[in-house]
Amino acid sequence: MAKSSDPESIHLEPKGTLFSQVSHTQIRSFHAVASAAGFTAASKILNVGQPTITGQVRSLEEFFGVELFHRRGRRVELTESGRDLYAVTQRMEILEKEAQEVLQTAGGFQSGRLRIGAVGPYHVTEMLAVFHQRFPHLEITVKVRNSEEILQNLLNFEVDVAVLSQTENDSRIIEIPFCREPLVVFVHSRHPWAERETIRIEELEGQEVILREPGSTTRRAFKQALKQNRVTIRPIMEIGSREAVWMAFEKVM
């Protein structure tokens, strides 16, 4: 008990949680007796001597000043307080089993869900085919967005893994390089460059270009390359996916 500076007010200090006052063994012993309707049967279930079970339950009753069982010879019946507590320990038993299942399966990827964010389906589809062969019981979901959105999803724990073309230096992220891809330009089959294998970035000066949307790392890398080489293009459209960019060539370029 602790007194405040006001002599007329008194504050009681909390006694703590249930498990700081009684042991898990006492709760477990009570649950076994309640389930088996007897101390002898409970001792067999827990593989513990009957006097130990009896002592655990008696300690629990004495600590809280309640009677949990009506003793009737070798059989026992729950009191009203005992029934209330048994309803709680039944839920505790279910949660304990669920916790064991989580711990048993987590390390082996035997069950669960993996949420992946990706900037496009190409590389992630290849990865998932291999991953699924190794861990066939995992449920996998894929969200396809631009890099900026996927990065925010990762930082907000909305996806577990992100497959990005480029990231900023961020101490919150662990990066594992997967591959390197060149920055390429697509042209229509009737374009003068269609038969060429390569072009110089300086040749893009003044060209009409369909760009990816803001937030795309493809766009960011392209813009950086243009700036470094002092090349100015003529953007005519912004599109939110590379697949849609390909389709736009047939209609626009």
Image (cartoon, rainbow, N blue to C red):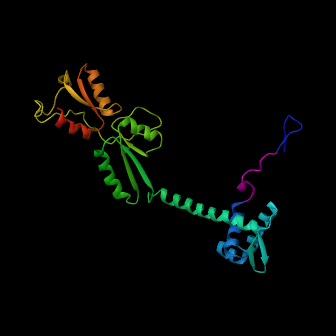
Q: Is residue 131 magenta?
A: no
Q: Which is more toward the observer, 182 or 212?
A: 212
The overriding secondary structure of the stretch rendered in magenta is: loop
The residue at 59%/63% (across/down) is 94
Q: Which is more toward the observer, 28 or 107?
A: 28
The residue at 36%/32% (across/down) is 215
Left or right of 196? Residue 33 is right
Instruction: In the rendered view, tell whether residue 154 sits above or below residue 169.
Output: below
Extreme front residue here?
A: 251
Extreme top residue here?
A: 230
Instruction: In the rendered view, tell whether residue 169 sits above or below residue 35.
Output: above
Residue 181 percent coordinates (x, y): 26, 37
Residue 172 percent coordinates (x, y): 47, 37
Left or right of 253? Residue 144 is right
Q: Quadrant of residue 204?
A: top left
Left or right of 42? Residue 197 is left
The residue at 69%/74% (across/down) is 42
- Quarter of the figure that contains the N terminus: top right
Residue 105 percent coordinates (x, y): 48, 59
Residue stretch in magenta = 12-22
Residue 148 percent coordinates (x, y): 39, 35
Q: Quadrant of residue 53?
A: bottom right
Instruction: In the rendered view, tell whether residue 157 sits above or below residue 148.
Output: below
- Quarter of the figure that contains the C terminus: top left
Count of picture labels: 0
Extreme right residue here?
A: 7
